[in-house]
Image (cartoon, rainbow, N blue to C red):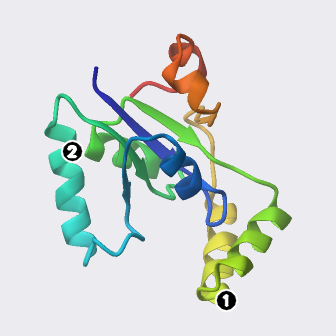
Amino acid sequence: MRMVILLTGPPGAGKTTLARKSGLRVYDRDDPEWLSERQFTTALRKLAGDQAACAVVIRSAATCSARRRAAELVGATHTFLVMAPRDELVRRIRERGRDPKRDEAGLKSWLWSFDSADGVREFPGWPAVFGEGIGTTSRRW
C-alpha cells in the first residue's frame, strides 16, 4: 500500500525526529545527500510517480497553498502539521548549533505566515498513522 506522509511545521517542531522514528524512507532537504534544491525536487517528483512508495517528506509549508503544492509534488497520501509551543521551538533551534539568528528569523516568518484554512491536522503519532484510524486523523490529498 502506497503511503507518502508529508510532515509540515516550523523550524524546531521536531519534524525530522518524528520522521526518522517512522521507519520509512525520509526525504529531508537538510540531509547532506541533497546537494541542491533542484536535485531534491527531482527526487520528490520521482517519489510521486512510485506507486509502491512508503516515505515521509519534510517541508515547512506554513500556508495552505504551500502545503497543497508540496502534497501535489510528492503525491502525498496524508499531510500533517507538527507543532510545539513557541518557547520550545526557540529552545530547540538554539540547541541545534547551526545559525540561530537565521533559524529564529525563519521561525518568526513561519509563525507570521501560518494559516490553517485547509484544515491541516496535527500529527497524531505513528501508531495512529499506521493503524486503522488514519482516515479520521489526517487530511487526504
Give neighbour class at mark 1: few <14, some 14-19, many 20+ (Cα, 10 Å): few
Question: Residue 116 vs residue 64: left or right?
Answer: right
Query: Is residue 101 rendered to the left or right of residue 18?
Result: right
**Of the numbered discs in the image, which one, if any, rests on residue 80?**
none
Decide if residue 88 is on the left or right side of residue 127: right
Q: Where does label 1 land, which residue? A: 101
Closer to us: mark 1 or mark 2?
2
> Which quarter of the picture shows residue 12?
bottom right
Q: Does 49 sit above or below residue 77?
A: below
Q: Which mark is residue 47?
A: 2
Q: Quadrant of the C terminus?
A: top left
Amino acid carrying label 2: it is Leu
120 relative to 79 in the view: left or right:
right
Residue drawn at x 16%, y 36% is 50
Vertical position of residue 128 compared to residue 88: above or below: above
Q: Quadrant of the N terminus?
A: top left
Camera-side residue of 134 and 86? 134
Helix, strand or loop status at disc 2 = helix
Mark with earlier residue (1, 2): 2
Query: Which residue is at a point 44% across and 43% down the rendered structure image?
Result: 6
The residues tagged by marks 1 and 2 sit, at their Cα atoms, a distance apart of 33 Å
Q: Position of residue 28 (x, y in %)?
A: 40, 61
Q: Residue at x 65, y 78 (%)?
A: 96
| Residue 62 appearing in the image | no
